[in-house]
Amino acid sequence: MFDKIYKSLLKKILEEGYQYNDPNRKDTYRKEIFHTEISYLYEKYPSLYCKKTFFKPAVGELLVFLQGKTDVRDYWKYNVNFWDKDVFRFNRLTEEEFIVARKEVLPSSKYNTGKIYPYQYAKQYHVFDNFKANPLRTDLIINSWNIHDLKEMCLIPCHYSFQLLGSNESFAIVWNQRSTDVLLGTPMNIQFYYLMGKILEWWSGYKFSGVIANLNKVHLYDNQIEFAKKIVEVEDIESNSILELNIPTHLKTHSFEDFVKSLHPNMFKLENYKYLLSEKIEMKTYTN
């Protein structure tokens, strides 16, 4: 299911995308389409067979965000390292100084991620409690694009808001993204919001139907083009992975804040996951 959607998107970018020099990354170009929508309203977990997707880092990043943690060392505990370059740029560390920071203890301020997603989510826990009280509300929106905080973030939000959309039968999560790295970002983002939905389903008792993504500036970087071409040529075989949640039952009665702060990665398992292609691709971070 997700494989077919994902490969179709890669193909569209490769065949129809316009090319330009990235204004935020030196000596880098993008191939891009303006906008697309991904609608994934299925029970099957959105892992990919065509290329390796990373389940544990997706769980780790989600928990750090939901638990409101703003220290990059909390990401490291879950083997999430893709925030590192943004953090050392934000804290004005050289790459060499940041390597030292990985091995030695520096002042806490040097590990600060700023007012990114975890800081913003922690101010909006009440939205989740409101969802549990009434999933049909129309104001169940989490917004990470706080104009007053943008200069205090190690990286301004790419997926900047999401809404919990409830009906009489189920709910979905709709997220909005201003800039979309399809090769590395999209497989993580869809897992992120799908996992969030399954967590909310477990905690609230409301059936989760899936995710919808409104994606803008949908692109591949120059160092991703060749691997994307390989992925498009892979035969259509869907992943049959199965998500398992092992969360203590007593947490159902907790407020959302207390609930998420009790979660741990070992409560999440992805069984029977297999993939075909894997290739290490450098993540292009800001240089300007």
Image (spheres, grey):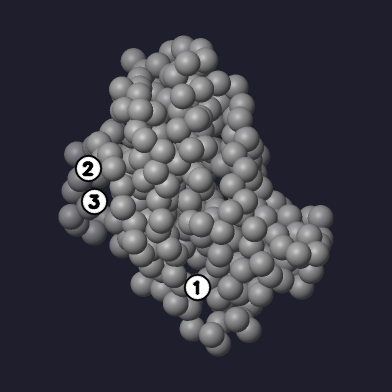
Badge 2 marks a residue whose secondary structure is helix
Q: Position of residue 22 (x, y in %)?
A: 44, 18
The CA distance from mark 3 to mark 1 is 26 Å
Is residue 18 or residue 82 the one in the foreground?
18
Binning the other alpha carbons within 10 Å of mark 3 as few (below 14), some (14 to 19) or many (20 upward) gives: some
Return the residue at label 1: 261
As drawn, 219 above or below 85: above
Pick the front one: 116 or 31: 31
Give the labeled residue for mark 2: 97
Please tell me which of labels 1 and 2 falls first in the chain: 2
Q: Which mark is residue 101?
A: 3
Amino acid type, mark 3: Ala
Mark 3, secondary structure of its residue:
helix
Report crowding for label 2: few under 14, some 14 to 19, many 20 or more residues within 10 A (C-alpha): few
Relative vertical location of residue 283 with respect to residue 44 in this rendering, above or below: above
Whether the residues at callouts 2 and 3 have beta carbons within 8 Å, the answer is yes
Q: Position of residue 117 (x, y in %)?
A: 53, 51
Label 1 sits on a secondary structure element that is loop
Which quarter of the image is occupied by the C terminus?
Answer: top left
Establish if 67 lies above or below 204: above
Kind of residue sitting beneath label 1: Lys
